Image (cartoon, rainbow, N blue to C red):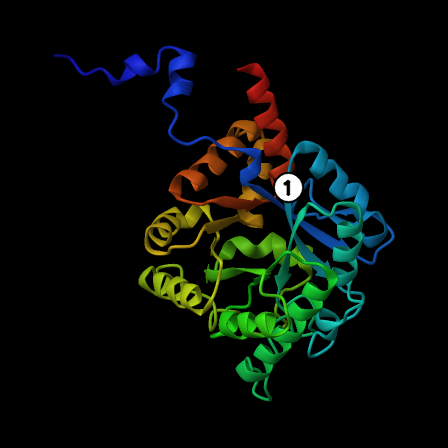
Amino acid sequence: MSKLPTRLRRNPVLRQLVEETCLSINDLVQPIFVTYSNEKTEIPSMPGQYHIPLDVIEKEVEQLVDLGISAIILFGIPASKDEKGLDAINDKGIVQQAIRKIKQHFPDLLVITDVCFCQYTIHGHCGILDDKGLINRKESLEYLQKQVISHANAGADVVAPSCMIDEMIKYIRKVLDNSGYEDISILSYAVKYASSFYGPFRDAAHSTPKHGDRQSYQIYPGNIQEALKEAKIDEDEGADIIMVKPALPYLDVIHQVKNMVQCPVAAYQVSGEYAMIKAASEKGWLDENKCIIESLTGIKRAGANFIITYFAISAAQLIKKISNEK
């Protein structure tokens, strides 16, 4: 008896029937950079991505909703910075104002907020520094609690701590529960590697460290047992969703985390992954549309329940087009 796997590939209907991984618009989360600026300005290292003025944030979100994208993650660019990133905990801060405006017009949209201090501080690190220039864990955790409560007060649905500070999930879950916000979910950047693929994001968020780097609190790229340990600790501390970041260079990590934890797993297709595809396609070296779908499908196949991606709009348009052609 002959076994010919290509029998199931010769007909498009058969291919669809046996498709193992199917990308959906429901899998996509769009990052948004909101600013006090009066102009929508393109981010040079991320063609097609913009700093969005607070005054027009509703119009930007409207196109996402019209495409069927049901979730966003907000990053704020403050008007000024200081040593402790006080705009991050200000009830009238840039993210807090954006949440209120978005929820007023789109109450059903899922609003996730990045919880960190790097873009709010003069030094560009992810927490409050001590007199030696190192992360002061105790003070940083207290400020994280203040930040998440200010986001919750504004109407955030999910808070996403990205600072990789030990016990951050325990402290955040405790303050949310004690403040009457038991229903707010925590999306933990539990597995965040010290990656070279973050470069364009730091351009977008104006968050490049002024001294040193983040290797003392992010995971070394060669380590996977450490990543699994981080994921398990955060799940045990109360994380509702575990994130792996970046995505494509760490598909094996996504897969192993998914097999270990009981909660959903998210993946972040980061700025460098986006920029590479954009740059190669602009050169004519890659087909951008095909690479968007293939890369996102690969991330989902590895085990991600959903994907934060700068390609969310393009991917949603392509998925609609593909669906209409079937």
**What residue is drawn where x is 37% and y is 50%?**
258
**What residue is drawn where x is 72% and y is 66%?**
153
**What residue is drawn where x is 56% and y is 30%?**
288
Horizontal relation, residue 223 to residue 26: left or right: left
- Place of residue 19 in the rendered image (x, y in percent of width and height, measured from the top left): 39, 25
**What residue is drawn where x is 69% and y is 61%?**
206
Horizontal relation, residue 303 to residue 95: left or right: left
Looking at the figure, which quarter contains the N terminus? top left
Horizontal relation, residue 246 to residue 126: left or right: left
- Place of residue 300 in the rendered image (x, y in percent of width and height, measured from the top left): 44, 40
Q: Secondary structure at mark 1?
A: loop
Q: Is residue 38 above or below residue 6?
A: below
Residue bearing mark 1: 70
Q: Is residue 183 above or below residue 32?
A: below
Q: The disc labelled 1 sits on which kind of residue?
A: Ser
Examine the image and state in which quarter residue 144 appears.
Answer: bottom right
Q: Is residue 12 above or below residue 232?
A: above
Examine the image and state in which quarter residue 75 appears.
Answer: bottom right
Examine the image and state in which quarter residue 178 appears.
Answer: bottom right
**Which of 15/194 is in front?**
15
- Place of residue 240 in the rendered image (x, y in percent of width and height, measured from the top left): 49, 58
- Place of residue 112 in the rendered image (x, y in percent of width and height, measured from the top left): 63, 55
**Which of 25/290 is in front?**
25
Count of marks placed on residues? 1
The outermost residue toward the left is 1
**Which of 92/245 is in front?**
92
Counting other residues with Cα less than 10 Å from the Cα at mark 1, is it few (<14), some (14-19), or many (20 or more)? many
The outermost residue toward the bottom is 131
